[in-house]
Image: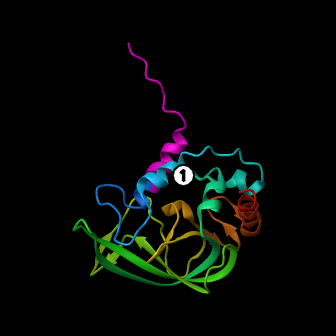
Amino acid sequence: MKSHKPLSHPRRWVALISVMLSIGCSAGGVPAGSTTSAVEEAETIERTSITPTTPAELAISRVEGFDLELYAQRADFVLLGHVSEARAQRVVYPTGDVRVETQFTIRTEEAFAGEPEEELILTVRGGEVDGVRSSVSHAAELAIEDDVLLFVTRGPTQDRVLGGAQGALLVREGMIVATGEEVATFAEAVINAREGA
């Protein structure tokens, strides 16, 4: 009987697959104007995670595959924002594939890293056009009137949520829903992770 060696670092694989799906690496490529390659994202994800030490890092480490240091350092902006509008549209990719993307208008409530504008437009894969809903596994899920803690990457033509669903953490009454941690405590951990870069 053959024994199979388990995959090393399964959380890295989960994170790698999540990032690849969020940037559109499965069968369809990346949209026109995008400069991020799957190889760059994969190489970044392969970095070794640090053992969480602060309360926010310990809490966020319970979100499968989330690496606070990686997200804090890779994001152009980390902010608490309010979703005020959403507009879905069909997009034709260079491969000829037609997909649905939604542009969300985010009002910046508080910036923890970088200097985002007072209002951002974030592009997220998936949405609803003409009564037909398109869902993308691991894409960020935003809804009008949500308060969210966002890790944002700035592209040449679009701003996107870093890492899909893991880069958009729902906030209710000052608490991050996924971790039960206060936004202020989490923000401090983000600032520390960026300063340690």
Q: Residue at x 33, y 55 (%)?
A: 26
- Which residue is at the front of the view, 146 or 156? 156
Please state if 16 lies on the left or on the right of 191 as rendered: left
Display colour scheme: rainbow
Q: Residue at x 47, y 68 (%)?
A: 141
Please state if 14 lies on the left or on the right of 33 as rendered: right
Residue 115 in the image: x percent, y percent? 66, 78
Please state if 181 lies on the left or on the right of 104 as rendered: right
User: Tag count in the figure?
Assistant: 1
Q: Residue at x 51, y 68 (%)?
A: 161
Residue 77 in the image: x percent, y percent? 62, 72
Amino acid carrying mark 1 in the image: Thr
- Which residue is at the front of the view, 53 or 37? 37
Please state if 16 lies on the left or on the right of 197 as rendered: left
Above or below for 44 versus 5: below
**Quarter location, residue 22:** bottom left
Residue 70 in the image: x percent, y percent? 62, 55
Give the magenta range: 1-19
The quadrant the N terminus occupies is: top left
**Quarter location, residue 178:** bottom right
Quick one: SS at disc 1?
helix
Q: Callout 1: 10 Å neighbours few (<14), some, many (20+)?
A: few
- Which residue is at the front of the view, 38 or 121? 38
Residue 2 lies within the magenta run: yes
Above or below for 134 versus 179: below
Find disc 1 in the rendering and name its residue.
Answer: 44
The quadrant the C terminus occupies is: bottom right
Residue 81 in the image: x percent, y percent? 61, 78
Above or below for 51 versus 7: below
Residue 138 lies within the magenta run: no
Q: Residue at x 47, y 80 (%)?
A: 104
Most distant residue in the top direction: 1
